[in-house]
Image (spheres, grey):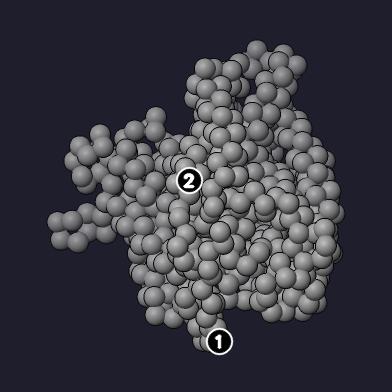
Amino acid sequence: MTNAVAARPLPTAQEKRVTFFALMIVLLLSALDQTIVSTAMPRIVAELNGLELYAWVTTIYLLSSTVMVPIWGKLGDLYGRKMIMIIGIGLFVFGSWLCGLSGGFGSLFGGGMVQLIVFRGIQGLGGGALFTGAFAVIGDLFPPRERGKYAGAVGAVFGLASVIGPVVGGFFTEHGTVDIGAVHIAGWRWIFYLNLPLSILSLFMIVTRMPGSVRKRGARIDFAGAVLIAVSVASLMLALSWGGHDYPWASPTILGLFAVFAAGVVVFLVVEHTVPEPVMPMGLFKIRAFWTTTLASFLIAMSFMGVVTFMPLYLQLGLGVPATQSGVAILPLMVGLVLSSGVAGRMVSKTGHYKRYMIAGGVFLIVGIFLLSLMGDRANVLQVAWRMFVVGLGLGPAQSLFSTVAQNSAPEGQMGVVTSASQFFRQIGSTIGTALCGAFLTARLAGEMTARGEGGAKAGLAQLQSLAFSHERAVGAVNVVVDPIVKAAFSASMTAVFLAALAVVALGLLAILAIPNVTLRKHHIHAEAVAEPGEGTDGVEA
């Protein structure tokens, strides 16, 4: 039985502007919290202890936010986007406040570092709602043709967060210490307190100006599906995070986690075919525009994270670039991303055509990564920088257009699940890309070191593996002097990683070529009423 869908209110131009501005604030804050903590971690560990739990401060945020993305998306469809955004911001503010107080609760949860991890988990729960809710609200407020330029702004926000996150984190850590009477507030705590005033401002704007959204009457929550997807995704992410670092890939722990993931997926698919309001409707995968854009975004995210995560390590250990210059070499990637994201978004809004820009982005990305693979161990900062700019040009359309095209295929009343599914698979792709490239890099590095027959290869490899593990979670820190033999081995290993990423991007381009080439419509309409025969809800004309 189909649930009645409440009529969508018609927001005013002012409501749209204020709501969009509030969404940009929360998106910036939630994106910043994936990067801002990295530079503060050495200071946090020194104060709270728990070095062995170092990685969990980042992992738990990604885990809790990713697990909740499809759940928040479905809840938004059922109970309204405004309610979900308010709850999400509330959780994010509460979690941020608690993170800033970590270590001040005595022996609660076993100590300061564990407290921070628990509170980061709460913060991540809210962050997941902000990501999927913001994109879905944009889909509610603006028709597909108009979304392009706003999606470009969203891409720019993510690029900005990637650039300024480590800088802001480092600034507050080094210079943010404040003494108020007898109270000493360490600088690193301000990276969490910074969220409070801006989040409260965005919450005020959303409560007072954001229009109500689609709600379904009499709908039931798919509790079984929510639990299954949470367990499955948590198992996969833990296996990918721990595998090759904390436990061998063939260990019972990692194999057990993969088994739980596989079993959870099978049961989840069965449940989603039987419940009336599934968390992730299987019918979406019959829509060509949805599954092709989802596959393309998964592959692009997988290759992108595989390259970018280890780039600081490559610059410092493979090319001998000082840590202070490695950030400068990566900055052009974000410049290219922001530029192409904005241009592609505006052109799509103007013309209604998107596929040409997605193809161009895929081609630029292939060219950029191929150029990176040619550098070896003799490139300088300038040679790296302009190649990273080309990679950024390729990534821009992916940041701004995949969600827009997926949303254009959404049946009425399923904007939230379509948006969240797109974001969900993109985040899973990033996690898998990071883990696989890390494992591949480590394996190739071992082979390269052995092939060079260096007497100190074993010790050198252990050092590099340790640095790689820390750098994939924190863009760091210190200048490392590496033996030329080790430097050559690391450069050769990274070249292999670039070539592997190149193959994944090529598959992503094939997926882009399969995306339906239709004109985005100018108005909100019932997609299923105008779908072309045999195409699900792909073909929607302007």
Residue at the front extreme, as displayed: 1
User: Compared to 62, does 352 lie above or below?
Assistant: below
User: Residue 461 in the image: x percent, y percent?
Assistant: 61, 22
Residue 375 appears in the picture as rendered: no
Query: Is any part of residue 184 visible from this angle?
Result: yes
Q: Which residue is mark 2?
A: 226
Disc sitting over residue 437 in the figure: none
Residue at disc 2, secondary structure? helix
Question: Is residue 173 or residue 90 the one in the foreground?
Answer: 90
**Number of numbered discs:** 2
Which residue is at a point 62% across and 67% down the rendered structure image? 412
Residue nearer the viewer, 60 or 245: 60
Looking at the rendered structure, the kind of residue marked 1 is: Ala
Q: Residues within 10 Å of mark 2 (few under 14, many from 20)?
A: many
**Callout 1 secondary element:** helix
For badge 2, the amino acid type reads: Ala
| Horizontal side, residue 516 vs residue 144: left or right | right
Identify the residue shown where x is 67% and y is 20%: 446
Image quarter (top left, top right, bottom left or bottom right) of the N terminus:
bottom right
Residue 48: give x, y in percent of width and height.
Answer: 30, 39
User: Vertically, is 260 above or below 172?
Assistant: above
Rendering coords of residue 142 (x, y %): 62, 76
Q: CA distance from mark 2 to mark 1?
A: 36 Å
Q: Residue furthest left?
A: 182
- In the rendered structure, which disc, 2 or 1, sits on the residue that comes first in sequence? 1
- Residue 67 vs 440, above or below: the answer is below
- Residue at figure coordinates x 15%, y 61% from the top left: 181
Around disc 1, counting alpha carbons within 10 Å, would you say few (fewer than 14), some (14 to 19), or many (20 or more)? Answer: few
Residue identified by numbered label 1 = 13
